[in-house]
Image (cartoon, helix red, strand yellow):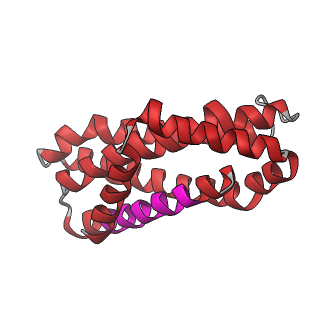
Amino acid sequence: MTPTDTLKHEHQIVLMVLDSMDKETSNITQTGKINVEKIEKFVDFTKNFTDGCHHAKEEKHFFVKMKERGMSFESGPIAVMLHEHEMARAFIRGIVDNLPNAANNVPTAIEAVRQNIVNYSNLLKSHINKENNILFNMADNMFTAEDQTELEAIFEKVEKEEIGEGVHEHYHQLAHEIAEG
């Protein structure tokens, strides 16, 4: 499996959770109530899988390899992806910051949580589309066979040593639990 295949597979897991987030925002709109437990699972997944695992692979390794092959971090596609990662983190902070008051049925906090979830989901769907259909094709065209092998080995090492044995699988299971719930 190539590094882009690995990242695309992770995108599929993220998209499952985003679909569930969209359903939850519809529920919030209809009921004015918030499911704190479900939103805490969203936050756990986004912080630890989407950002801590997936974005970390991209930022620390994949984008760095693209830079080595001539792509800029300051402008162009990588700069856009990095900026969108930061925007996503800000939306998650907005959820976390407002969740305690939302749990206490403060209407403005409930709306802030809902809006941050909507913004996060919309951003990530667009972001994933750009990566899957543009950036990853560019990377596959610029990476050598050795680059591909090296990155895949690095991704495996990140899974075991930085993220931890079994953590990736835990978040796959959580994504399925979220999607089914």
Query: 178 or 123: nearer the eye?
Result: 178
Q: Can residue 122 be seen in this view?
A: yes
Q: Is residue 83 visible?
A: no
As drawn, 60 above or below 91: above
Q: Could you tell me what secondary structure mostly forms the magenta stretch?
A: helix
- x and y, in percent, of residue 163 in the image: 43, 35
Asked where in the image residue 82 lies, by quadrant, the reply is: top right
Q: In this view, does 41 lie to the left or right of 73?
A: left
Residue at the image point whose x is 55% and y is 60% from the top: 9
Asked where in the image residue 167 lies, by quadrant, the reply is: top left
Q: Determine the residue located farthest toward the left in the rendered image.
A: 104
The answer to if 4 sits in the magenta stretch is no
As drawn, 32 above or below 147: below
Residue at the image point whose x is 61% and y is 58% from the top: 8
Residue at the image point whose x is 63% and y is 40% from the top: 153
Span shown in magenta: 9-26
- x and y, in percent, of residue 131 in the image: 68, 54
Q: How many marks?
A: 0
Q: In this view, does 180 lie to the left or right of 102?
A: right
Asked where in the image residue 150 lies, by quadrant, the reply is: top right
- x and y, in percent, of residue 168 in the image: 41, 47
Rendered-image quadrant of the C terminus: bottom left
- x and y, in percent, of residue 176 in the image: 33, 65
The answer to if 14 sits in the magenta stretch is yes
As drawn, 56 above or below 28: above
As drawn, 51 above or below 125: above
Residue at the image point whose x is 75% and y is 46% from the top: 148
